[in-house]
Amino acid sequence: MEPIVYVLDEQVRDLLTHLTSAGTLEEGVAFGFDDWTVFHAYTEKPFTTPSGIVCPCFAVRADTAGMVDETRLTSSVRARTDLSERPAVVLVVDTHSDGTPQCRALIVSHSKMAAADTRFVPRRSELYSRNAGLLETSALAAKKVVVVGLGSGGSPVALDLARAGVGQFTLIDFDRLELGNISRHVCGINDLGRYKTLAVRDQILQKNPYASVTTMEVNINQALAPVEEAVAKCDLLIVASDNDQSRFNLNQMSLNHNRTALYGRAITRAAGGDVLRVRPWTGPCYNCVFSSGLIDGREEEMSQKRQALAVLPAYVEEDKANAMIQVGLSSDIAPIANMMVKIALLELSRGQETGISTLDEDLKADFYIWANRREEAYAAWPLMNYKWTRPSILRWYGARVERDPQCLVCGGHLKADTPLQGIVQ
Amino acid sequence: MAWTSQQSARLRLEMEILERYFPSFYLKDSIIPGRACVEGIIRSNSGAEYVVRLHVPADLPNSVPDLEIVSPFLHDRFGHSLVELGTSYPMHLLKPEGGLVRICHYSASHWNPNITFAKVLLKIRAWVEGYEGHIETGFPIDHFLPHMQA
Ligand SMILES: [Zn+2]
């Protein structure tokens, strides 16, 4: 089999605009896999963390007749770099008579030179064309989503939205990826120690290289102003953070700027979880639902010591905080993340006729409950067996929750724009 | 940074409620989020007066306000200063700050934006009775004032 070399369409176009004379070697970098049968070649810094084994890469423009002197090219590559351990990828770029870019690759080792099968990684329009039957992909590419919390819940949501073609992301989290996170996170061991925001950004770019991703490594409770600025500019706010204080703060921001928000969380050891959609001023807000008793801070899944310490009074010993860390499986988080993605796509496609429009008629409720196992809050649920007419694990239930007229956040109890001066003594 | 308009309105609401239930409380440094506090006197059944300071959180009303006893300087029944006692579960005390006793009233997992300053001060009113009960009997404060579930 001929080796395969992947190049980014846009990088070849760039190369053609600045490599004006034939024969000059431009340096890049390539990554080889599987006994040098597959290569990814880049002429500019890769936009995402690459994998594979680093190999030298050179690009050269063909002459006006579309030719290169391969013997001279090979010897100048060998003179530039030591090829005893790994081969070099040489890209020969040119334009077709119709002006479209052309690129063929050569694999040069210390002893031989071979042609490779060259393939373009296409531009955005082709990458997501297969979703077009279901989603309005061009509209999604322009949508901006803020994701707060890039842990086991937020990271798969962000990634799935990128897979669906959502084009603009702001990722907010100040945690770094630790060993204990890996089994439930979309990122792996090669991202250990990195900010979750940056590691997830790279994963998003793997799925959608043309996505625009900005990141904020801040504790939202201590950086209210910049976070609110991001919320004000988004089409949808996704909250997968791990504490109520942040959810209360984000709830206020979503109401301030009339931005729909989705809240998802798992309860202890991910025995189940819930998803809440807040349509500001038309449905219940996060605080309305919280004070209805449907959400209870004590039940929240604790996946990190920092999170446990934040809700425990200061006099609780570290042992207790450690004992509170009880995590579920990735497969228990997946249904909750998946529901968030479905509602997110529905909200982002609102106002357009798409293949998922009927879903809107089903998802009338704003609050959804899921149980993975008959334990914790779901211990008394009947067995699933063959019945489908009563509550059971592994199914979604929509709950009717009304706005709370007593809610001090959205209940209209605050007189807007009252000057403070009157109450200062 | 300044208060948002919702926060200003919320502060006004808080002060209106306090005026009804704890009329001695007034707002200090009100225009600076993170520095503003509410201060006043809580009187126990025995007639003793405690000066109480509630720090208005910068993200009002979304997090638990810190609460301290400014005066008198508190001791336990055995003559030890409560500040030196430090963090104490049986006495409902958090780590003291600036030489002042901090009281554990609501934990973060029990907080929500519907809780007003007046509700917090009601808990402090109960703590003060528990404290005087301790002075009288030697029982720790949580003998009089059970804990909320963690
Ligand atoms: Zn509300």
Image (tube, coloured by chain):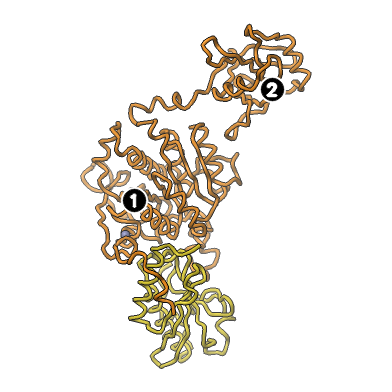
Chain colours: A orange, B yellow
Quarter in which the C terminus of chain A is drawn: bottom left
At horizontal 66% and vertical 18% (from top left) the residue drawn is A20
Residue A207 in view here: no
Residue receiving disc 2: A26
User: Label 1 crowding class (10 Å Cα cut-off): few <14, some 14-19, many 20+?
Assistant: many
Query: Does residue A133 sit above or below B96 in this rendering?
Result: above
Residue A61 in view here: yes
Residue mark closest to the camera, 1 vs 2: 2
User: Where is residue A214 shown, x and y percent of the image?
Assistant: 52, 43
SS class of the residue under badge 1? strand
User: Where is residue A217 shown, x and y percent of the image?
Assistant: 55, 50
Image quadrant of ligand 1? bottom left
Task: Name the kind of residue labelled 1 in the image.
Answer: Leu
- Rendering quarter of residue A66: top right
At horizontal 25% and vertical 45% (from top left) the residue drawn is A364
Task: Name the kind of residue labelled 2 in the image.
Answer: Glu
Q: Kindly give the residue lying farthest to the top in the view shown.
A: A65
Residue receiving disc 1: A276
Q: Is residue A194 left or right of residue A231?
A: right
- Rendering quarter of residue B115: bottom left
User: Where is residue B126 shown, x and y percent of the image?
Assistant: 40, 82
SS class of the residue under badge 2? strand
Query: Does residue A264 sit above or below A42 in this rendering?
Result: below
Quarter in which the N terminus of chain A is drawn: top right
